[in-house]
Amino acid sequence: MRGSDGVEVRGGVCAGGGIGRGVRLGAAAPLCAQRARVAPRRAAAAWTMGKKADFGPFTPVVVTTRIVIGEKRFNALRGKGISLHSQVIGNFCGYVGASGKTKQGLIRLAKNNGSKLGFLS
């Protein structure tokens, strides 16, 4: 950060144990203020298992199906559907001669669209 006179101002911990706030760094600055570079603490990130899917027009159908057929069968069915859709995208990319990077981008786009529509709820 720069002060009004253009001299760099930085906080730091000096040998005296105090925190030097607003210490001006320059030719006349104390040695301890020039050495003090403490990285800011970051807040601990909350653990999440993945992005929560958006609520879309197909969310009620997906949630009802999960309840009716059970979690295990539902996950197997969803995995099979995602696998088949990825294969179709791969076959299309092979047909038109698209690169692997384009294929990855299309699969990522399909996942985002599926989330917006509620298929990943």
Image (cartoon, grey):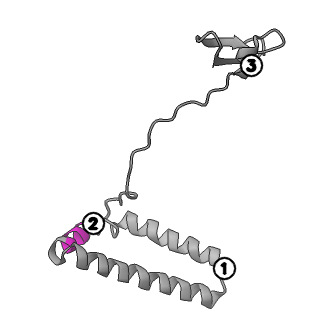
For the point 62% across and 27% down, the residue is: 38
Q: Position of residue 54 (x, y in %)?
A: 35, 59
**Foreground disc of the pair 2, 1:** 1
The magenta segment:
60-66
Give the camera-side residue of 78 and 15.
Answer: 15
Look at the image and tell me in which quarter the N terminus lies.
top right
N-terminal-most mark, 1 or 3:
3
For the point 24% across and 79% down, the residue is: 73
Amino acid type, mark 3: Gln
Q: Which residue is mark 3?
A: 34
Circles 2 and 1, Cβ within 8 Å, touching? The answer is no
Circle number at residue 99: 1
Amino acid type, mark 2: Thr
Q: Which residue is mark 2?
A: 59
Location of residue 78 (image quadrant) = bottom left
Give the camera-side residue of 19 and 91.
Answer: 19
Give the camera-side residue of 74 and 27.
Answer: 27
Q: Position of residue 93 (x, y in %)?
A: 60, 84
Within the magenta stretch, is there residue 63?
A: yes
